[in-house]
Image (cartoon, helix red, strand yellow):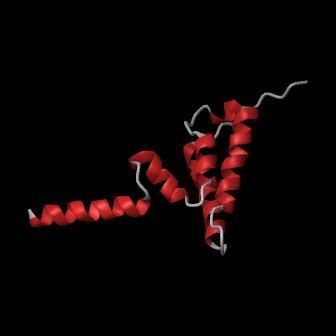
Amino acid sequence: MSKISNFRYAKESLFIEFNGAKSKDEQLKGRKYKHRLAFCQEHLEHSKTNPEWYENVDINWENLVKAYSAPDPRDHFYMTVFGKTYSEKMAESALEKDYGENA
C-alpha cells in the first residue's frame, strides 16, 4: 500500500528550521556552521527522495551544502555573487562611500 503525502514545505517553515540551526551554531566554539550544514544536507537528501515536499520553494540545496562546507561560508557567498571576499567587498564599498561624500 502506498502512502500519498500532502505535506509541502513553505518558505516560512524552512526559515524557522534554519534559524533553529543557526541558534545552535551560535552557541558553539570553533566551527560555527555545523548545524546549518547538517540542516542543508538533510534537506538535500529529502529533496532527492521526496521532491514533492519542495515544489513550493525554489532552493538549491547542493549550493548551500557547498557554501556551508567552505571554511568561511560568508566569503563563499560573496565570491559567488561579487567575485570578492566579504572583506574585499566591504573595503570597496567604503571607498565608494568616501568617494561619494567627497565628490
Q: Residue 35 versus residue 4: which sits nearer the camera?
A: 35
**In the image: residue 21, left or right of residue 93:** right
In this view, 74 is above or below 4:
below
Residue at the extreme left of the image, as rendered: 103
Q: Residue at x 70, y 47 (%)?
A: 41
On the rendered structure, is 96 left or right of 25? left
The residue lying furthest to the right in this view is 1
Residue sitting at the far top: 1
Residue nearest the observer in this picture, 42 or 32: 32
The quarter holding residue 30 reads bottom right
Please indicate whether residue 83 sits to the left or right of residue 48 in the image.
Answer: left
Residue drawn at (58%, 34%) of the image: 56
x and y, in percent, of residue 62 in the image? 63, 41
The residue lying at 64 percent from left, 57 percent from top is 36
**Count of numbered badges drawn on the protein:** 0
Percent position (x, y) of residue 32? Answer: 63, 67
Image quarter in which the N terminus is found: top right
Picture coordinates of residue 67, whole percent (x, y): 58, 51
Quadrant including the C terminus:
bottom left
In percent of the image, x 69 and y 36: which residue is there? 47
